Amino acid sequence: MIDLIEGKVEEITSSYIVIMTNGIGFKIYTPNPYVFKEHETTKVYLYNHIREDEYSLYGFKTKEEREFFIKLLSVKGLGPKVALPILATGSVTGVIDAIDRGNILYLKKFPKVGEKLARQIILDLKGKLIENKETKVVNEELESVLESLGYKKPDIKKVVVEIDNTLPIEEQIKEALKLFVR
């Protein structure tokens, strides 16, 4: 199987990119093609989808994004054409939180995800999705600060998932306090 491709982005459309490498153009479906830049050399992590009548490549900027996509595919009745828009329109941490909390309404906002499929996603994936280690360390630091300020753990967990973990810890604390006030 092809795990990774590096090459020049030749074409960008609303649903896929074409990467040229060694004279071959690979059509790769991706959650958000516009994160790539035309005529720029890039690295894309791939998922190979092979069926009797189809051979498709799905590409991702990070390994973590690809792993989440593969976990979504493990859900009964959920194929790549449904999983891709979930990654395109939702944040990975938001989707994981919705699954862990059993939030059917959040999952139903994605294209082609109805009540039945949303329940199946929760049934198949609840408790099986692990955050990446770096995010977990940052979240633990934020959680301990909020706990020392007197907030309860269940309330902290709800607020932490809504905060951008790429912000400096001081900004994350400010955002968390704003969320507690509302």
Image (cartoon, rainbow, N blue to C red):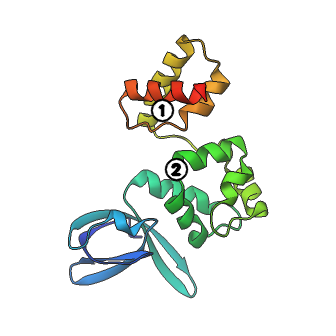
**Residue 130 picture location, percent across and down:** 55, 41
Q: Residue at x 59, y 46 (%)?
A: 96
- Along the viewing direction, whichever of 152 and 137 lies nearer the viewer: 152
Quarter of the image that includes the N terminus: bottom left
Q: Residue at x 52, y 28 (%)?
A: 178
> In the figure, 66 relative to 135: above or below?
below
Q: Which residue is drawn at 34% across and 62% down?
A: 35
As drawn, which residue projects farthest toward the bottom? 53
> Residues under labels 1 and 2: Cα distance?
14 Å
As drawn, which residue projects farthest toward the front? 182
Examine the image and state in which quarter residue 109 appears.
Answer: bottom right
> In the figure, 157 relative to 91: above or below?
above
Label 2 residue SS: helix
Between disc 1 and disc 2, whose residue precedes? 2
- Badge 1: how crowded within 10 Å, few (<14), some, or many (20+)? few
Dot 1 amino acid type: Lys
Dot 2 amino acid type: Val
**Residue 145 picture location, percent across and down:** 49, 17
Q: Is residue 122 left or right of residue 151?
A: right
Q: In this view, does 107 lie to the left or right of 40?
A: right
Instruction: Give the residue at mark 1.
Output: 136
Label 1 residue SS: helix
Q: Is residue 172 left or right of residue 78?
A: left
Instruction: Give the residue at mark 2.
Output: 92
Q: Are marks 1 and 2 in contact (CB under 8 Å)?
A: no
Q: Which residue is drawn at 61% across and 30% down?
A: 182
- Badge 2: how crowded within 10 Å, few (<14), some, or many (20+)? some
**Residue 114 picture location, percent across and down:** 74, 64
Mark 1 vs mark 2, foreground winner is 2
